[in-house]
Amino acid sequence: MNDHMHQTQSFDTYETAWCPGCGNFSILPCLQKALTQLNLDPHHVLMVAGIGQAAKTPQYISANGFCGLHGRALPPAIAAKIANEKLTVIVETGEGDSYGEGGNHFIHNIRRNVDITHFVHDNQIYGLTKGQASPTSEIGHVTGVQTNGNINQPLNPVFLALAAGAGFVARAFSGDQKQLVQIMMDAIQYPGYALVDILQPCISFNKVNTFASYKDRVQPLTDSHDPTDFSQAVQAATQTGEQIPTGIFYRVEKPTFHTRHPVLADHSPLIEQTCDPSRIKDLIQSFV
Amino acid sequence: MTVNVLIGGAAGQGIDTAAAILEKILKQAGYHVFTVRDFMSRIRGGHNFIQIRFGSEPVHSHTHNLDLILALNEETISLHQAELSDNGLIVCDSTTHADDSRLLPLPLNEISKKLGNPRVAGSVAIGTLMALFGLSPELANPVLPSFLNEKYISINQKAVAEGYKLAQQRWSVPSGSCQDWMILSGNKALALGALAAGLKFYAAYPMSPSTGIMEYLAEQSTHCGIVVEQAEDEIAAINMAIGASFAGVRSMTGTSGGGFSLMVEALGLAGITETPLVVVDVQRPGPATGLPTRTEQSDLKFVVSASQGEFPRLVIAMRHHQDLFYQTIRAFNLAERYQIPVILLSDQYLADASATVLPFSLDNLTIETPVQPPEDISDYKRYQITESGVSPRVIPGDPRFLTTADSDEHDEWGRITESAEVRNQMVDKRMRKLDGLKRELEEPELIGDESCDILLVGWGSMYGPLQEAVATLNQEGQHHPGCVSALVFSDIFPLPTKRLTHIAGQARLIVNVEQNATGQIAGLIREYTGLACGRSLLKYDGRQMTGEEIVAGIRKIREVAYE
Ligand SMILES: Cc1ncc(C[n+]2csc(CCOP(=O)(O)OP(=O)(O)O)c2C)c(N)n1
Ligand SMILES: [Mg+2]
C-alpha cells in the first residue's frame, strides 16, 4: 500500500474506507490483476466513478482518476475517451449510480458505443446512504425506507443492456475472482462499450443478498454457451429460478463511436489534432 | 439616416431566407445592418417577422418605426401598419386585400408562377426592394448562391431581375463602408469565437435559442476537427464537457435557462475539481418553458449563484457581436488560467440578430495551456496549495505523473478527506483565485460623459438600445435638464465596481434598464457597492426594449426628477 498517488509504474492499491468483509475488497485486487496482466501503463489508464461506496475505487488504485457526481460517471468517461483515445477508460461505480441516478446515461451510452469499460458493483442496495432499495433490489426487500418491503420490480441490467444494443455484456460475482479477472480483461480489451454487472455482497446493509446466497446460486456459463448468439445471450440474461448465470453473455464487435466519427476515425487523437488558424480565417471570410 | 424594413409572413413562407439574402445584399452595398428576428414557437403558420434596419452609420439595435413592410400575408399588414411612417410603403402581392393608402400591390405571385416556381415570389420582392433603395441589380448575383440550392440559383436570379423592373428608386441612403465587413448572427459569432479559441469538444442538448451554436459548430466539425455531440440531456452535456476538459481538450456546453437548471450540480463539479469550463446560457423568458423563442435577461441572479456550495466563477454578459466573439475567446483563457467555470450570458435578441461587424481579427489571439508542475519534482500535487490558488494541472496520459479529480473535498493529491484543516485550506485556495480574477475584470463601457445627471446602468444586450437612447436624449439635452450617460456591463460577476462607483458618485440618479421584472443588476449593485438605483426601466414581455422606449421612460423620469 502506498501513501500518495504518484506511482506511474504499477497499479498499487491504497488503504480503503470500506467495511470489513465488503465485497469491494475482492473486486479491487481483481481489477489490479487485470490491469497488470494486460500490461497497461498506469498513466494511460483513467478510472472514472460517480459517488457511492463502489465509486471510491479510483481513489484506491494507482492510475488517473476522475470521481464525479452521483449518477454521472459515464458522461465524463466517454468524453475523456473522445478527447484522448490513447487512454484506457474504465468506469467503476455502483448500481444505484449506474442504473438509477444515471439510468439515462446508461441507455444512451450503449447507443454511442464509445470504447470504455463499465464495471458495476451491484450489491442490490444503496450502500453509501446506508441501505435503501436500489434499482436491482428484490421485491419484498425491507429497508429503512421500503419499510413494508420493496414493491417495485428489480431492473435486469444485463437484459436491458442487450436490448439497448450493447456488444459486450457480462455478469460476474465478486466471490469468483478467477472468473472476474478474466471477464475484466476481456471487457477492457473489447473494442466498444463493455458492461460487467458484478454481484457483490454488502455486508452492512444488505442482509438478503449475502455472500452465501450468491455463492450458492451463481453458475458460470458452460462452454456450450455461444457469446456471439444473441438469442442464447437473451436466454441466459433472462434466466429465472434459483441459479444465477455468470460469464460473458454476449460479445460481438460493432462499429464504435470513434470508427464512425468523421473527425476521429483514422485520425490522431482529438487532443493531438490542431486546427490551423487559416481555417478560422476561412470561416470569418465566409461572412464577408 | 436609417431605413427600417419589416418582412412578415407565416412560418414556412421563406421569410428567413429572403431576409438573409436581403441583409447580405445591403451589406454588400456598403450599409451597416442590424436585423432582429421575431419568431413564434411553431414550424408552420403563425406570424413571424424580421426587421432589417440599415444605414450609412453604425446601427446598434432595432426600432418599431417602419419605413417599408414586405407583407407575404395579410396578417402582416394588419399587425404592423400602425408602425409604418406616413410616407412608408407596403409591398405585397396584387391579390392582397388591405385598406391602406401606402399599399404597393405588385404581381409577385404571378411573376413567380410564370417563371415556373411559386416559391420564388420572395426573390421577386427582393428585386423590387433593391430598386426602391436604388441598389445596383448586380449586387444580388454573388449573394444568392450562398443561400440557395444550386439548381434554384438561376430562377431566383431571374426573379430578382423581374422584381427590379416593378419599381423606381424611392429612398436614397448615403452609402456606408461595410462592403468588406462581416454580417452574421450572434450565435454564429459566439461559435466562431469558440472555434478561434481552440474549441475541440462541444456537447449540448437542443434548446432554443441556443441551438444555433450547436448547429454552426456541427457544420464546421470536419473543417475544424472538433467533436460536437448531442447529449441525452443537459446533465450529460455539461458532465461530458467537464470530462473532455479534464482530459485536456478545450470544451464548452451551451443551453438556455431550462437546460442550465439541469446543469447546476455539475457547475459545482467544475468548481471543486478546478476543471476549466465554458458554459453558454442563451437566455429566454422563464420560468420553466416560458416563451421559448423570445428574449429576456432574467437568468443573471440565477447563474451567479447556481449550484450548492461556494466556488469562484466568472460570468460575462454579451453586449454585441464583438463581445460574442472576443469575450468568448477570453472566457476560454480565463477558464484555463483560473481553472474555473466561466458562464457566458447571451439572449435570444442577440443570438438571432444579425449585425455587420469588422471582420474578426486573430492577430492578438493567444491560447493558454494548463500550467505545469516543475520538471524536477517527484511528488506531484494536483491541488497544491499556492498563493494564487491555481495549482499545476497535469493532463491524464502524461508519463511523468498521475492526476486525479474528485467531487468530494480532497487533499492536495486529490484524495478524499474530511480533515477540517484541509477543508479550510482548500476552500481558501479556491476562493483565492478570485483575487487574481478581480484584478483583470473589465470595467463596464461608458456611453456618454463621465459627468452626468442621470446614469443608466444596463448589461448585455441592452447595450444597443442604450446607445441609441443616450444619443437621442443628449440631443435634447439643451432643452431638458439632466444629461444622461450609460454604463453597460459585460464582465458582470464578480461585479467590477470601480468605474461604477466613480461615475455614480457624481450622478444625481441611477436608473437600471433591464429586460426582466425584478431589476437584477440593481440587486447586484446594491449588494456589492451599496449604491441604490433610484428608478428602473424594466420590460419582460419577451420583446427587446428599443432605444425609443428607453427615451420615453427616461423623459418621464426626468420630468418628475426636475419638476
Ligand atoms: C445528486 C445526489 N443524490 C443523492 C446522493 C446521495 N447518494 C450518494 S451514493 C448514493 C447511492 C449509492 O448506491 P450505489 O450507487 O449502489 O453505490 P454503493 O454505495 O451501493 O456502492 C446516494 C443516493 C448524492 N451524492 N448526490
Ligand atoms: Mg449499490
Image (tube, coloured by chain):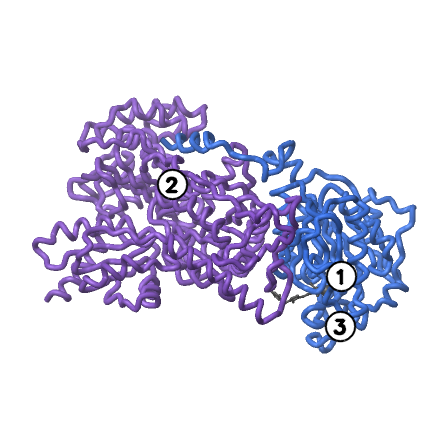
| x and y, in percent, of residue B109 in the image | 33, 31
Q: Specify which label sits upstream in the sequence, 3 or 1.
A: 1
Residue toward you, B225 or B100:
B225
Q: Is residue A279 left or right of residue A89?
A: left
| x and y, in percent, of residue B176 in the image | 23, 32
Q: Please rate how many residues cluster around mark 3, counting C-alpha atoms within 10 Å: few if below 14, some from 14 to 19, many from 20.
A: many
At 37% from the left and 53% from the top, the residue drawn is: B441
The local secondary structure at tag 2 comes to strand
- As shown in the figure, which amino acid type bears the numbered disc 1? Asp
The answer to whether A95 is drawn above or below residue B160 in the figure is below
- As shown in the figure, which amino acid type bears the numbered disc 3? Phe
Look at chain A in the picture and name its colour. blue
- Disc assigned to residue A205: 3
The image quarter containing residue B284 is: bottom left
Q: If the picture is divided into quarters, which one holds ligand 1?
A: bottom right
Q: Is residue A104 visible?
A: no
Q: Is residue A147 left or right of residue B170?
A: right
Q: Is mark 1 within 8 Å of ligand 2?
A: yes
Chain ID, mark 2: B
| x and y, in percent, of residue B316 in the image | 39, 53
Q: Disc 2 designates what residue?
A: B185
Seen as rendered, the residue at the extreme front is B376
The image quarter containing residue B169 is: top left
Look at chain B in the picture and name its colour. purple
Is label 3 on the same chain as label 2?
Answer: no
Is label 3 on the same chain as label 1?
Answer: yes
- Disc assigned to residue A122: 1
